[in-house]
């Protein structure tokens, strides 16, 4: 194990171990042996390894798990990132030799996939929303439905963002119902734009109503206002063709006439964290000239990973297989059941003292996407008369690589939906080790 650590890391671990032994040493105690010191050093190094960012097995059933990095990058994007151990043509035009735009290829791909006139990238969708408001609505009014004043993870509240941008918020309608006339009556000479927000992480159902985007665009004929559609999750394709619920898509918003559309790159698009702004060229140019655009721009890692994720959408017939997020979302429950049964059969042959069952369950999209949409799944339920669920779960997390599961009904449940190829073998080895007292 020592060979995998630098001299500096080993020295620090030895010093920490010696210091701990000294602080607990009594006058009558015998100094620690070399073997005891070695064991302590290894334990310290192991604890430090647990804190570094490294691959884990996602057995939670949450496909876009924020704590686990959200979307699993497509292999094509990973392969492209591995080639960045040398210089690249990030911001140079190879034809002219002159300076170019760092996200030019992503722009080209997104224009083709969505029909937008122009595109720009920032580091996440919150940044996209803020830049649009700061550049186009500062010291003016924006009109928004009360039912769309969202709060997302990390206490990100849209009213706070609007206030920080320098715009003045004008709320219309009620929590559950907003009509077209509400927007029309709110527009004044001080109105800069109408902001429509997709409530990605919740749904209002029952006695409710919201105004379709096309109707909001129709108000532009009466008064000169911009219409901005904040989609949040940012689907590029119709998810119903994959057996999933309907979700607004970027091409639909562009076709409906929105001046600007913004969305995330790491949710339903399945790429790296990024904010994507699309729409009419005259407004994208204004955003690019704003001082914030340089502060919020993406680096080469994001640009390259997103480019190669977007290329997969040019091959729709193979998209459900090549894009991990879509593959996890669309896997049939029966396939997952067969996977779980094979895993159980393998473990049964080992005769380990753990109770292993295959039970039905529910997965979730996560990341604020497709809320209140349970996805049928099958899980491997693990229990033991000698080990509590918390103990089993903790030992799974201390495996190498760590395995992140969930606890339900006094069982540790490993969801088949979010496992990647090869994860089943890792799970088998880990459970055998736990059954024999391993993975402390």
Image: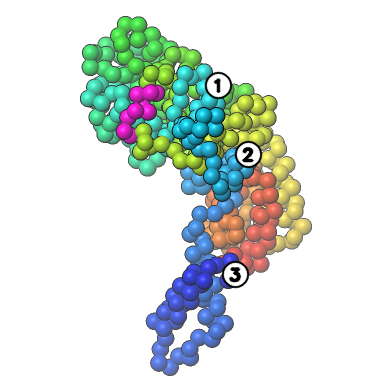
- Relative image position of residue 270 (x, y in whole percent): 55, 35
Mark sitting earlier along the chain (2/1): 2
To which residue does mark 2 refer?
76
Point 68% across, 46% down: residue: 421
Question: Could you say whether the residue bearing mark 3 is in a helix, strand or loop?
Answer: helix
The span picked out in magenta is 284-292
| Cα distance in 3D space between marks 3 and 2 | 32 Å
Quarter of the rendering containing residue 418: top right
| Cα distance in 3D space between marks 2 and 1 | 20 Å
Q: In the figure, is residue 20 to the left or right of 327?
A: left
To which residue does mark 3 refer?
3
Quarter of the rendering containing residue 327: top right
Q: Which residue is nearer to you in this view: 393 or 264?
A: 264
Question: Local crowd at mark 1 within 10 Å, few (<14), some, or many (≥20)?
Answer: few
Main secondary structure along the magenta-highlighted residues: helix
Residue that extends furthest to the top in the rendered view of this protein: 222
To which residue does mark 1 refer?
112
Point 68% across, 40% down: residue: 336
Mark sitting earlier along the chain (3/1): 3
């Amino acid at each position: 194990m020592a060979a995998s650590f630098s001299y500096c890391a080993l020295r620090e671990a030895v010093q920490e171990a010696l210091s701990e032994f000294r602080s607990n040493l009594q006058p009558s105690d015998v100094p620690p042996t070399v073997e005891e010191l070695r064991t302590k050093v290894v334990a310290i190094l192991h604890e430090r390894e647990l804190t570094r960012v490294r691959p884990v097995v996602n057995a939670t059933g949450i496909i876009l798990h924020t704590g686990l990095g959200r979307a699993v990058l497509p292999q094509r994007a990973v392969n492209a990132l591995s080639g960045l151990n040398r210089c690249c043509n990030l911001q140079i035009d190879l034809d002219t030799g002159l300076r170019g735009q760092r996200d030019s290829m992503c722009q080209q791909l997104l224009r083709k996939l969505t029909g937008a006139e122009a595109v720009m990238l920032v580091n996440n969708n919150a940044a996209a929303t803020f830049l649009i408001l700061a550049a186009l609505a500062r010291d003016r009014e924006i009109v928004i439905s009360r039912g769309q004043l969202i709060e997302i993870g990390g206490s990100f509240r849209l009213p706070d963002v609007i206030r920080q941008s320098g715009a003045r918020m004008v709320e219309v309608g009620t929590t559950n119902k907003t009509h077209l006339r509400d927007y029309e009556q709110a527009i004044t000479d001080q109105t800069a734009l109408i902001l429509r927000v997709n409530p990605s992480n919740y749904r209002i159902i029952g006695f409710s109503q919201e105004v379709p985007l096309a109707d909001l665009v129709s108000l532009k004929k009466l008064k000169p206002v911009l219409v901005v559609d904040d989609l949040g999750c940012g689907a590029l394709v119709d998810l119903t063709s994959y057996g999933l619920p309907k979700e607004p898509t970027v091409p639909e918003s562009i076709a409906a006439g929105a001046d600007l559309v913004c969305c995330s790159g790491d949710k339903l698009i399945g790429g790296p964290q990024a904010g994507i702004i699309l729409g009419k060229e005259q407004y994208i140019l204004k955003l690019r000239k704003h001082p914030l655009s340089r502060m919020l721009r993406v680096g080469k890692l994001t640009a390259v990973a997103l480019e190669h994720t977007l290329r997969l959408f040019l091959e729709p017939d193979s998209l459900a297989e090549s894009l991990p997020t879509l593959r996890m979302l669309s896997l049939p429950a029966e396939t997952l059941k067969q996977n779980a049964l094979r895993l159980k059969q393998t473990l049964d042959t080992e005769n380990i003292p753990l109770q292993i069952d295959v039970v039905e369950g529910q997965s979730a999209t996560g990341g604020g996407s497709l809320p209140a949409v349970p996805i049928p799944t099958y899980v491997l339920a693990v229990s033991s008369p000698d080990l509590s669920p918390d103990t089993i779960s903790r030992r799974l997390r201390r495996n190498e690589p760590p395995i992140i599961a969930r606890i339900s009904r006094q069982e540790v449940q490993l969801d088949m939906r979010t496992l990647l190829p090869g994860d089943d073998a890792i799970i088998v080895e880990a459970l055998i080790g736990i059954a024999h007292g391993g993975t402390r």
